[in-house]
Image: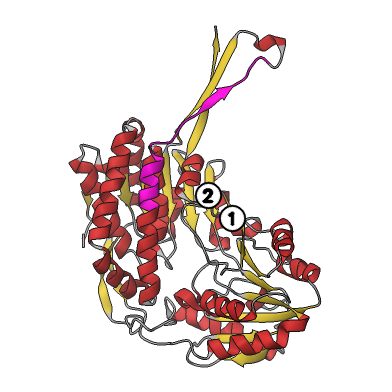
Amino acid sequence: MPNKLPIGAGWAEPAGYEDVLFPYDGSLVGQAPIGDADLARSALDSAVAVTDEVAAIPSRVRHDLLTSVHRMVQEHSDALEELLILETGKPRRDCHTEVQRALLTCLLSAQEALRIHGETVPLDLLPSGDGLFGFYSRFPIGVVVGIAGFNYPFLLAMHKIAPAIAAGCPVICKPAPQAPLATLWLVDLVRRVADDLGVTPALCQLVTGGADVGEVLTTDSRVGAVSFTGSAAVGHAIARAAAPRKVLLELGSNTALIVASDADLSAAADAIVSGGYYASGQACISVQRVIVEAPVYDEMVNLVQERAEKVVVGDPREPATQVSTLIDDTATRRVQEWVAEAINDGAAVVTGGASDRLVPTVLEHPPLQDLIWREEVFGPVVAMRKVDDLDSAWKLANDSRYGLHASVWTSSLRTAFLAFQNLKVGGVVVNQVPGFRSDAMPYGGVKDSGIGREGPRYAIEELTVTKMAVINL
């Protein structure tokens, strides 16, 4: 693991080092080099200096670079999974999924590097345009700053780095302080591959650190775009600080899953439990709010309870573990406090509850104003409510400042399309967990869940700008 920071075409001495701890037992995973504001400025200077050089890299070379990165990540996937388990505390099954999705994201980005194109535009719609020929092409937006969250650090970094390179943009990545090691490994790999191909390693840099580093990276007028994944509060602050530069924000949610009275209840219960507790609930589209039509509500609660009480809690290194510790003690205390608040305010405990040990929890009818219902819990907690009909379900699901994904369970095609029309979210998933995400699809939210779309094809569109040509023939 590198012990310096990849800045410019070489390696910079860090401002210091910080321990990275295994969330499950607090043991030392390793030490991460830590950056500061001066190192962030140095990275920006280097990125700006190579902007034209990176933009001029032929598409075939960008494709070959990312294809080589894909191959080398695949060769080291087992060791990478082990590292992700240790630095995130996420269960093994979820870390395996993270690596596989990152591989797909890298490969899709390589393919999309060959498909960046424009089109002709008719200009003779008025007599003044007679004899004019018009077309546009897409050009790189410039320096991209990618800031990733701790829950899927490698995958999120890949979603920043690979599309930026495919688009012809130099990229500076800032990983989450709790989990920087896998991203540092990735950036080192990208730079080594670039060097082998005769491309400047400065096309991909990394600066760790705190808010001072983030402030420098997001407020510099030379940045073309800032891509951030994390909390709504931080995302909104970044958007204000970065203006008028482009920002792409993938923020939080309190994802709703709606169960219609004609649904396959057993399958829906499976989805609620698997979708609510994967990654120990630390996923922006994990199931948090379950809204059930009244005729099947009691049966649904019983089915969910039966399954939730069988969820395996334990060491994330064990293959059977489904839920483990959260990223740190602060996150654990916050979730415990939110659960306790809901119980004190009258929510019924189906299973789990407020205790010294965070376990898979199901609550019934927490007050709508409580944090456990209206904010993103980011922990293994599911809250259930009964509604009279589907119109009430749409209204309750939409009564949120968030809108990332939602799920509906039904045997009616009409209900499925009504959900698609009525739910104010970035994606509606029918008869599957709302956490389903293919990295080929456009992904993002509305309202306080963010702006812009990820997925290599769509991210490349965000990271390029159109330039119009008008020619008088």
The segment highlighted magenta reads: 105-124
Residue name at image x 43 percent, y 81 percent: 322
Disc 1 to disc 2: CB gap under 8 Å:
yes
Crowd tier of the residue under label 2, counting other residues whose Cα lies within 10 Å: few below 14, some 14–19, many 20 or above: many
| Image position of 254 with respect to 456: above or below | below
| Image position of 154 with respect to 378: above or below | above
- The answer to which of marks 1 and 2 sits earlier in the sequence is 2
- Residue 147, position in %: x, y? 43, 55
* In this picture, residue 200 sits left or right of residue 110: left
- Residue 459, position in %: x, y? 48, 46
Name the residue type under label 1.
Gly
- Residue 402, position in %: x, y? 65, 63
Give the quarter of the image for residue 122: top right
By what rule are the colours in the image chosen?
secondary structure
Residue name at image x 32 percent, y 57 percent: 35
The residue indicated by pointer 1 is 450
Extreme left residue here? 196
**Element under disc 2:** strand
Whether residue 27 appears in magenta in the rendering, the answer is no
User: On residue 131, which mark appears?
Assistant: none
* In this picture, residue 268 sits left or right of residue 457: right
**Element under disc 1:** strand
Crowd tier of the residue under label 1, counting other residues whose Cα lies within 10 Å: few below 14, some 14–19, many 20 or above: many
Name the quarter where the C terminus is drawn: top right
Name the residue type under label 2.
Leu
Residue name at image x 35 percent, y 76 percent: 92
Query: CA gap, disc 1 to disc 2?
Result: 7 Å
| Image position of 312 with respect to 377: above or below | below
Residue name at image x 32 percent, y 80 percent: 317
Whether residue 115 appears in magenta in the rendering, the answer is yes
The residue indicated by pointer 2 is 248
